[in-house]
Amino acid sequence: MIPGTAGPAAGIPAPPLDGPGAATRDGDHGPGWSGQHAELADEVTTALAGSLNLRRTVLRLVDLLRPRFADWVLVVLADHRLGRLSLHGGTDPTFTDSVARNPAEELGAGRVLRSGQGELLHVAADWPTTDGLDSLVPHDALRAQAVDLRPADVLGVPLTARGSTIGVLVLLRGGDRGFPAEDIALAERIAGRAATALDSARLYEDRNRVASVLQAGLRPPSLPRIPGMRIAAGFRAAADHSDISGDFYDVHGHGDDWLLALGDVCGKGVEAAVLNGRARQSIRTAVHFDRSPAVVLGALNSALYDDGDARFVTAVCTRVRPGADGGAEVTVAVAGHPPPIVLRADGTVEELAVRGIVAGVRPSATYTEVKDTLATGDTLLMFTDGIYEARGARGFYGMDRLTRLLPVYAGAGPEAVCEAVEQDVVEYLAGRPHDDMALFAVFCGR
Amino acid sequence: MPGGFPDAPGAPDPVARFDDALGRGDADAAVEVVDGLLDAGADPLGVLVDVIAAGLRRIGERWQRAEWTVAQEHAATAVAVVATRAVARRAERVPATRGQVVVACAEREWHALPATIIACALRTAGWQTTLLGAATPTRRLSQYLHDLGPDAVAVSCSVLGSLPATRHFIEAGTAAGIPVLVGGAAFGPDPVRALALGATAWAPDARAAATAVAGLPAVVPTAPPLPQAVAAEQAALELAHDRLAADLRVRWSPTARVVGTPPLDGIDGVVGSVVDQALHAISAVLLTGDTRALSWTADWAEALLAARGADPALVTELGDLLTAALPEFPLALDLVERHWDRGLTTSGHLPT
């Protein structure tokens, strides 16, 4: 038996908020105490709708309730994945920790979680032990905070949403203010609304965890440092909140022999990103055996065709071999993709003359290669059709606009070139929707 | 010497050597200066603020004074990026113990380097940082806020044209209860514009940003809506921007009135900037109520044109053209009439 326990709070019939029985403990609180809180439940609903993040939602709930409604607030959430209870709040609203959940828990938080019924506990000032509190506040440091506030009333209300009790909202009022019946009823209303928001955030977090893990291999890679060269990329997905798309770029190799690949799978969004992942993997494997761009694209073509998928991929592969003289030999092959542009150090713009069939539509394909030499200050730029097919108020952005833009960025480095093109295209779009866009530049020099 | 950096006896001032590396577009030399300072025990925040950010500011000034071409400006900026990465590599060794901050630039803000410097400074101070690049769509920021649930958002805004989108960032952050720290040249020299836009806090530089983030509240209320009348007129002005800018470019022709030595990059390159900047300044004043943005922009335009050999009186003419172009925008019209010419007798302000 828990000393001072008044029994499950939910069992107490709640009088109407402004009804004749509203003030149950005369003198405990000034007039209008409940009236101040009447709008709190609505505030909880509005405020908690602002975030789908579990941690932020908990923070906001604690912030709304303390000190207006309770002197101390703890949110206990059941983490079914880990079989633990996560604890948020206390004196420091940003505090979080977790404790093992005892499935046989018969008291406090465990019982509220299992029964979905609230509990009210009075902790007297002179009570020698913390009996009862240890089950409602199952954490030593947090319990010490609650004990410091003695005498206190501790209310544990269930956070029940969509038929499941997902946690417990633990509210503490110090002194002899206590929780009159109408405040218990209000606490339950607040908990009901908060629970829906917390449950949505929990669902979002679960889904997001799955999505993040699956997406990890589809995001653009971080770029390595190539001796004597600088590389940079630009990337913008058609879905402007997304980090994955049908465009990709990758770099493989080491020492003085590198392969840079950029490609575009047909379609957009997640479906395209999955195919993009397959194409990148095929290229990665092919490069392992041979860094010749024609061989790599031939392997990509066969791998995609053998998959039996009707969709195709366009790609450009550039092999870069930095020389001892500060320059670099480049070998380029394309599969249905616009050839790279070379921006010379003096501002001259050249389009490399190389063509090839898209990958994935014929059982086998042969690709031709073109060679070029980059001198110090030269930039080779690869890009997808999302760049020149961007549609603004005056039609397509176009290759002409791209080649006119580049000369002033001669020698400015690959970051400046990618940023300038991305900026010019996005400003040209002026907020209109666009296809996936990718840019990949390699610059000769430091 | 800023920051009082430790230095080898007899070696030139590291700040001067860094500027020299920027001028030559020499990334290796710039990294050498930064690494040398850090090896000698310099505070990484000091290196970021007093060497790299200060160098970046001088890059902008040199372009404004027409001493550098656009390509030189970009090459120097790229060198500053590489130098910042050198500091960032060391910052990665600091344990991240203080929570998480998302650092971003709103749409129309293409200066990613100041945000990179802020992210590096916060990382040095022990914050885990997620840097979203230049011109981040608000939906992308929101996605990250839902996914990460950070302790704060830090927004870098260098150009007036990005202030409206920065307001959207402030709405996205505060709607989720997340405090939003702002800074950058577009906010001017004090917190007036930041607070008018509903930001939680303002910081003048990376060092101050590191201090300010530590003092932010855990939860903030949703930023209150902007006054309806100005918000509506600013939105209409934004929609009409392309039409107004094209019209002004046709009517205003500084190219015909070059009086001094021929400018480095040609004057055409700056005409578009000045016209866009003037319209963005009007928007900025509508949203923030800070009329200095308008008079300082006129001032900046005057310096920009003068440095390129054009008649400074052209700025007054642009003011008249703006007045004539804005009959549908009564609040904007009133602002131009009262504040455009005010700055023209003084000079030296950046368009903040």
Image (tube, coloured by chain):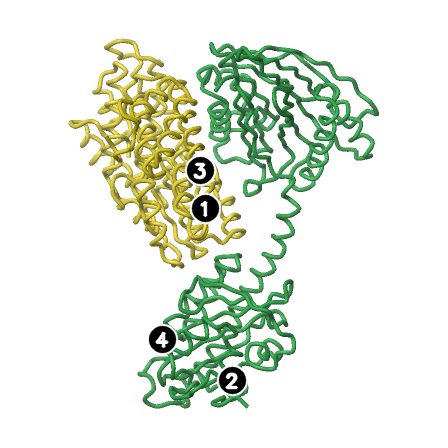
Image quadrant where residue A385 sits: top right
**Dot 3, how many residues are within 10 Å of its Cα: few (below 14), some (14-19), or many (20+)?**
some
Asked if the residues shown at circle 1 and circle 3 are in contact, with their CB atoms under 8 angstroms apart, the answer is no
**Gap between marks 2 and 4, in whole Å?**
22 Å
To the question of a shared chain for discs 4 and 1, the answer is no
**Dot 2, how many residues are within 10 Å of its Cα: few (below 14), some (14-19), or many (20+)?**
many
According to the image, label 2 marks what residue? A9
Amino acid type at circle 4 is: Gln
What residue do we see at 62% from left, 15% from top? A330
Dot label at residue B198: none
Q: Is residue A175 above or below residue A398?
A: below
Q: Is residue A67 above or below residue B312?
A: below
User: Residue A167: percent from the left, percent from the top?
Assistant: 56, 71
**Gap between marks 3 and 2, in whole Å?**
55 Å
What element does badge 2 sit on? helix
From the image, which quarter does the N terminus of chain B lie in?
top left
User: Which mark's residue is nearer the viewer, 4 or 1?
Assistant: 1
User: Residue B133: percent from the left, percent from the top?
Assistant: 47, 37
User: Residue A291: percent from the left, percent from the top?
Assistant: 70, 21
User: Which mark's residue is nearer the viewer, 4 or 3?
Assistant: 3
According to the image, label 3 marks what residue? B90
> Looking at the colours in the rendered structure, which chain would you say is drawn in yellow?
B
According to the image, label 4 marks what residue? A36
